Image (spheres, rainbow, N blue to C red):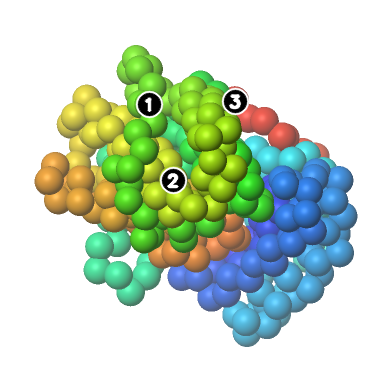
Amino acid sequence: MPTILAIESSCDETAAAVCRDSNILSNVIFSQKIHEQYGGVVPELASRAHLQSIVTVVDAALKDASVSLDEIDAFAFTQSPGLLGALLVGAGFAKSLALSFNKPLIAVHHMQAHVLANLIPTTSPNNLTGFPFLCLTVSGGHTQIVLCTDYLKMKVIGQTLDDAAGEAFDKSAKILGLPYPGGPLIDKYAKDGDARKYSFPEPKIDGLNFSFSGLKTAILYFVRNEKIKNANFVEENLHDICASIQSRIVSILLNKLKKAANQFGINEICIAGGVSANSGLRMAFETMGKKEGWKTHIPAFEYCTDNAAMIAITAYYKFLEKKFEDYSVVPSARMNIEVW
Ligand code: KG4
Ligand code: ZN
């Protein structure tokens, strides 16, 4: 019954969680607000903010779990991918704890953790149980379709050739003059908009890969042209524009997911990552799942965007397989591996 403390610091959330077996005892997330004014994450500011808040966040995770440091059996951290300076803070902190308490150190791949967020036990009845499954992992930095054949055996079978789905949301939002991160705002405004009002192109990309850069350019020119005719175009039509953009991003994602499910003959399907918090995607995914006869799984809302609970659950499965690191392990900004 291992108790694990996990730290996530790959981007702009400082997060810590404690799990006992696969049960999450605490999940604390500090979202750095400093980046809003810059329209995107500033790496140096992210590292500094992680340094300033990591002690408080870890302390809160231990207190929420009613667990003391000497009860921890292993310390886990996000190794990659992410911002190097930000990753170093979490890695350094976890290493120091592991060294001081003479306990194993576990390095976790952030994208693998997003997928395994689907394995966190929740009260929802459709918890994922079987392998193989497919997971559409959609975040601010990645868009992947992952074939998962065991807890730690994953293969990327499709991915974006340019922008990630989260970037498509955030960059579209920026074109509309909305602050960073724009994804949740597009979601909010889309709720009472007409998704059929404006039509944006679906890229023709072979196989299971994605591309979002053409969509971004199409939105940029569309908005620019409409603003020449009416300077208040965006303000007057914000809800319909957001609904139309969201509906196109969602259809690009789900059409490829359907193709993957058919190609691999798999009907156990998950979504994960920050964009899986999108209400339009969640709804359309469930609708497609019913039509296609899928068993659909979506992580609880708090486990979609970056969090340390997903790092903890991945670390738990690594603990069972004794996948430990020595103290020389270093984080890496990119990890271009296709198979975990
Ligand atoms: O997984 P995540 O928290 O961080 C990364 O690993 O990148 O994903 C962040 C991304 C951002 O692009 C953010 O705009 C997007 O997820 N996002 C959303 C929503 N909530 C977060 N996009 C659309 N609708 C949402 N509700
Ligand atoms: Zn993430």
Q: Could you tell me the amino acid type at mark 3?
A: Asn
Give coordinates of residue 263: x percent, y percent: 22, 25
Mark 2: C-beta under 8 Å from nearest atom of ligand 1: no
Q: Which residue is mark 2?
A: 241
Q: Which mark is in front, 3 or 2? A: 2
**Mark sitting earlier along the chain (3/1):** 1
Residue occupied by mark 1? 201
Q: Which residue is mark 3?
A: 336
Which of pointers 3 and 1 indicates the residue nearer the eye?
1
| Residue 294 at least partly seen | yes
Q: CA distance from mark 3 to mark 1?
A: 29 Å
User: In the depicted view, which residue is nearer to us: 227 or 253?
Assistant: 227
Residue 26, x across and y down, in percent? 57, 74
In the displayed structure, does residue 284 sit left or right of residue 109? left
The label nearer to you, 1 versus 2, is: 2
Q: Is residue 178 left or right of residue 186?
A: right
Left or right of 101, for residue 199: left
Q: Secondary structure at mark 1?
A: loop
Amino acid on which disc 1 is placed: Pro
The residue lying at 68 percent from left, 58 percent from top is 13
The correct choice, above or below, for 295 with respect to 210 in the image is below
Estimate the x, y position of residue 173 in percent, counting from the top left: 57, 45
The residues tagged by marks 3 and 2 sit, at their Cα atoms, a distance apart of 35 Å
